[in-house]
Amino acid sequence: MSYANPYENNPYANDQGYEMNDNQYASAQDDHEFVDFMTEINNIHTELDTYQNLVNNIDSYQKRLLTEINYETEQNLREKLDNLTNNAQQLQNQLRDQIKNLQVKAASSQSNTMKAQIENSRQNFLKIIQDYRIVEANHKDSTKNQAIRQYKIIQPNATDEELEDAILDSQGQQIFSQALLNANRKGEAKTVLQEVQDRHRDLLILEKSMAELTQLFNDMEQLVVEQQENVEHIEQNVDDAQHDVELGLGHTNKAVVSARKARRNKIRCVIILAVILAIVVVVIVVPIVTHN
């Protein structure tokens, strides 16, 4: 028994085959993009853990710094703390850029899983940033209070305004020098004053760090709004492009219709000319032939 080829008389058989291949290719491409996306998500999770550990270590070193009485050990702790702070700053900027990049990819995708994963990463990042801000704020208060106590050792009659200027003002060095000149016990005053200057430096660094963290937190909060605006902009561009395509097709169709009308008119002219020639032949040529 023989069977007829079901595609033998189907003019769309080959087209359907190509369509299936295109769909399979698109599906494979989507799967590949999803795998790459999730790999980047896992990398972000690892870096978030590292960032959290850095914040915890910074908190620990800051507390040790406030209780350390040996000057050399204190300077060693301060150096390590600076390194931790720099590492945290580099990593948080890297995380910010990575999360922004993946949010763009997720926003242009139809995958709700991708959108949920990157939003979860963003929220975790915001939480750690907020934890870091609290750590820095607490350390700032503790450092300020300690600096005030130390300054009062050499200037017990200092006013609140003088204390604020000495501890927080960026020009505190001049106040420190004047306080040293006015101190009764120069040796003790010099040691205490050095400690106050160190606290003053710490406070300036903390002010800068807290400002950067606040800006970073606001940037990540604003990121959702920006991505929504980007998606709407992309959708508008797609709509505009579709409109332009449809408009172009409309002009093309009009051109085709005009060309067809021109061809029909040309054919009519040829037919009319042929009829006229036939009439001329009948009216002039035929009588002459008949007469002869």
Image: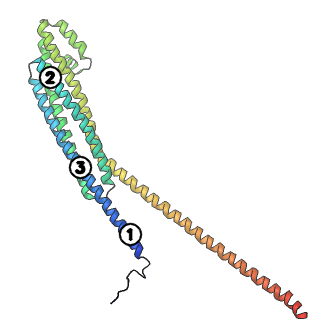
Q: Is residue 96 above or below residue 31?
A: above
Q: Is residue 282 above or below residue 69?
A: below
Which of the two labelled residues, at mark 2 and mark 1, occupies the earlier sequence position? 1
Which of the two labelled residues, at mark 2 and mark 3, occupies the earlier sequence position? 3
| Distance between mark 2 and mark 1 Cα atoms | 68 Å
- The quadrant holding residue 219 is top left
The residue tagged with tag 2: helix, strand or loop?
A: helix
For label 2, the residue is 76
The residue tagged with tag 1: helix, strand or loop?
A: helix
The residue tagged with tag 3: helix, strand or loop?
A: helix
Question: In this image, 39 relative to 64: left or right?
Answer: right
Question: In this image, 77 relative to 275: left or right?
Answer: left
For label 3, the residue is 41
Check if mark 2's residue and mark 3's residue have beta carbons within 8 Å: no
Q: Is residue 263 above or below residue 81?
A: below
For label 1, the residue is 19
Mark seen at residue 102? none
Question: In this image, 240 relative to 57: left or right?
Answer: right
Q: Residue at x 38, y 69 (%)?
A: 19
- The quadrant holding residue 172 is top left
Closer to us: 96 or 34: 34
Q: Amino acid at mark 1?
A: Glu
